Structure formats: C-alpha cells, structure tokens
Amino acid sequence: MDWAEDSAAKKEERNWGALDHIREANDGRWLFVYGWVLVAMTVTFALLFLAGIVSWSWHYLVSERWHWLNDQQLSKVQSVIFSGGLGAILSSVVQKQISKNN
C-alpha cells in the first residue's frame, strides 16, 4: 500500500520542494519581525533607564519648586534605577546581540 494514496498526501508530495521554500520564507519573516521587536525593546528599555536617571538627577540638582515627584515616588525611581534590574535587562539584550555578530 502506497502511503501517498490519500489526495492530500499526494499533493504534499508533489509540492515538497515548494514547502521547503515556504518554510524558509516563513523563517526569514520571523527573523525580520524578531529583529524589529528586539530593537524596539532595547530602545524602550534604554529610554526608560535614561528617563529614570534624568528624573532622579533633576530632583537632586534643581530647587524644589521644579520637582514633580514626591519623596516616595522618587525613592521608587531610585530603587528601580539602582537595583540593577533595568540595567541588567538592557545589558543582557545588547550583549546577546553583539555576541551573535562575532
């Protein structure tokens, strides 16, 4: 008994080369989208980290009438910046991508 007696199986066998091409095209599209998502995430985390540093520095460098965060909010910003979590994520993503190019 031939395994390709089913019409769907015969169609798949006839188009086997095209399926490889489709799979390669899908892989290419996935890598393209993954690359853009990774760039967007890296930029987002970098901007968040930079905004946190600027906000925190601003509150320590200028007079109180220019402040927009209270002490509790400023403490939270400081803990996020200096806990290393945000910087570690950013550093990890960038380091992983740089290592792929070598």
Image: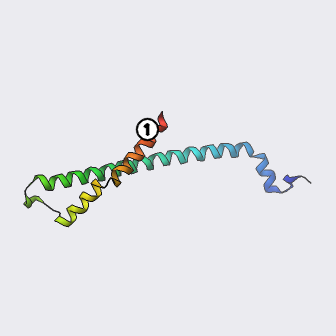
Q: Residue at x 25, y 59 (%)?
A: 77
Question: Which residue is the extreme one toward the top?
Answer: 102
Name the side, left or right, on which 65 lies relative to 29: left
Residue at horizontal 92 percent and vertical 54 percent from the top: 1
The residue closer to the viewer here, 69 or 78, is 78
Q: Quadrant of residue 71?
A: bottom left
Please rate how many residues cluster around mark 1, counting C-alpha atoms within 10 Å: few if below 14, some from 14 to 19, many from 20.
few
User: What x and y, as percent, mark residue 30?
Assistant: 54, 48
Secondary structure beneath dot 1 equals helix
Colouring = rainbow
* Amino acid type, mark 1: Ile
Pick whichever, 66 or 98, lies toward us: 98
Figure check: 37 above or below 72: above
Q: Position of residue 95 (x, y in %)?
A: 42, 42
The residue under label 1 is 98
Q: On the rendered structure, is 51 left or right of 21?
A: left
> Depth check: 86 or 66 in front?
86
Q: How many marks?
A: 1
Q: Closest to the observer: 28 or 60?
A: 60
Q: Position of residue 67 (x, y in %)?
A: 13, 60
Q: In the image, is 22 to the left or to the right of 16?
A: left
Q: Residue at x 78, y 51 (%)?
A: 11
Q: Is residue 51 left or right of residue 5?
A: left
Residue 88, position in %: x, y? 37, 50
- Residue closest to the far front: 83
Identify the residue at image location x=74%, y=45%: 16
